């Protein structure tokens, strides 16, 4: 996966969470570190699904807890 997609994902999450890009290190936990609630998590998944024209199975959503996992998830789907 190219760095441009990683940057797109990071920028998208930053915008949704209203968090500066600098605070979105790959291992920063959305829930513990950034206090993301379930509605924001759904908003991230919905935006991700729309942008990349994929469907994230409901059972996979709780497994995506940080930016690194979201990027890895994208890599696994597109490979």
Image (spheres, helix red, strand yellow):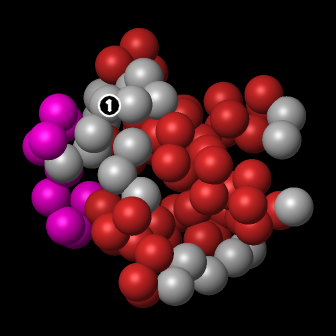
Q: Is residue 69 magenta?
A: no
In terms of depth relative to the viewer, which is nearer, 50 or 45?
A: 45
In percent of width and height, residue 32 lies at 14, 41
56 relative position to 54: left or right: left
Q: Dot 1, how many residues are within 10 Å of its Cα: few (below 14), some (14-19), or many (20+)?
A: some
Residue at far bottom of view: 58
Residue found at x 52% / y 39%: 68
Residue found at x 61% / y 45%: 71
Q: Quadrant of residue 5?
A: top right
8 relative position to 68: left or right: right
Please identify the dominant SS of the magenta region: loop
Q: Is residue 37 magenta?
A: yes
Magenta highlight range:
32-40
Q: Is any part of residue 16 visible from this angle?
A: yes
Secondary structure at badge 1 equals loop
Which image quarter is the N terminus in? Answer: top right
Q: Which residue is mark 1?
A: 28
Above or below residue 3? Residue 5 is below
In percent of width and height, residue 57 lies at 52, 85
Residue found at x 41% / y 14%: 22
Residue found at x 68% / y 56%: 74
Mark count = 1
Q: Quadrant of residue 18?
A: top left
Q: Is any part of residue 43 visible from this angle?
A: no
In percent of width and height, residue 62 lies at 32, 69
């Amino acid at each position: 996966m190219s760095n441009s997609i990683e940057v797109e994902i990071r920028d998208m999450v930053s915008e949704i969470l209203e968090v500066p890009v600098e605070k979105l290190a790959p291992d920063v936990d959305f829930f513990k570190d950034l206090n993301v609630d379930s509605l924001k998590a759904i908003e991230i998944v919905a935006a991700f699904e729309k942008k990349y024209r994929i469907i994230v199975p409901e059972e996979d959503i709780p497994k995506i807890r940080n930016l690194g996992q979201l990027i890895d998830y994208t890599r696994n789907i597109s490979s």
